[in-house]
Amino acid sequence: MTKTISKEQLLALKQEMNKKALSKRRARMGLRVVTNILVVFVVLLPLLYAVSIAFMPSNELFTMELNLVPKHPTLTNFKDALINVPLLRFILNSFIMAGCITLGQIVTCSLAAFAFSFLEFKGKGLLFMVVMATMMVPGEATIISNYLTVGNWGILDTYPVLIIPYLTSAMGIFLFRQFYMTFPVSLYESAKSDGCSNLKFIIKILIPLTKSAIGAMAVYTFINAWNMYMWPLLVTGSDKMRTVQIGISMLNSVDSQSITLMIAGVVMVIIPSISIFIVGQKQLIRGMFSGAVKG
């Protein structure tokens, strides 16, 4: 009888401990959720307020009252922004520029990374060090020489001048090389022994195995190209070739309505980049960390 009671007591004590542990886990989880919600709200507050201003008439913005939410929401700011500047044309130009730069960097960086990972040639280590050293050179240091070069080529105010200087990057080469280093060299040697050419090895074997790296590179490169301002401002001079970042600055003027117009334009412009980041954020994180651990 005593043994039966002790077992029941032990079972009850175990259930009570499980309930306490479950309550603690739920409390910690609830605290984490509340903390994350507060952090997200603080981080997104400027963006949410920008969206609110985009729908707000200018007479509601410039008042003594703190209007966080528009009392009379309107789409006039978006319509006026599209009328004042050819914003849709600028968006198209940015899509063409960012898309071509993204595709170009994926091709050139993957090919260069393949050479640094699988091929053996004299001075490979030194050449890779030189490529990595270019990451320490700021873009502003080379912008004048690049401008003089493309000016001599006679391609100012065209799509090629927006695309060609950014068709490769040291960061992309480094990313792909680190990913390729996780593959054994025997994989390449086996493919070569079966009569597989280098290009066929890249297309048939490497690319299917490096989708996460390609996705990370695509998201990172597209967002950077989409947000470029200084180079497009320097090499374009007509509305036919300007990009969205220049178009947003063209909405700014001395009158009070320009603030709401500019914010409305900003909201329209950030939608593509935010959408691409949301869709590709898992690929971006996976690609950035997949090559960090070998094996």
Image (spheres, rainbow, N blue to C red):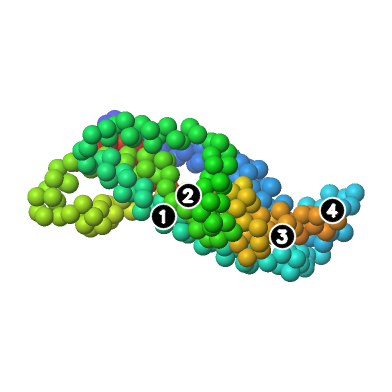
Nearest the camera: 108 or 41?
108
Q: Which residue corresponds to mark 3?
A: 264
Instruction: Provide the secondary structure element on which disc 1 rests.
Output: helix
Q: Which residue corresponds to mark 1?
A: 104
What residue type is disc 3 on? Ala
The mark that comes first in sequence, 4 or 1, is 1
The mark that comes first in sequence, 3 or 4, is 4
What residue type is disc 4 on? Val
Q: Residue at x 33, y 35 (%)?
A: 128
Residue 247 image position (x, y, % from top left): 68, 58
Question: What is the spatial separation of the Cα atoms under label 3 and label 2, in whole angstroms?
Answer: 29 Å
Which quadrant does the C terminus fall into? Answer: top left
Instruction: Provide the secondary structure element on which disc 3 rests.
Output: helix
Residue 188 image position (x, y, % from top left): 17, 46
Q: Residue at x 21, y 52 (%)?
A: 198
Instruction: Provide the secondary structure element on which disc 4 rests.
Output: loop
The mark that comes first in sequence, 3 or 1, is 1
Which quadrant does the N terminus fall into? Answer: top left
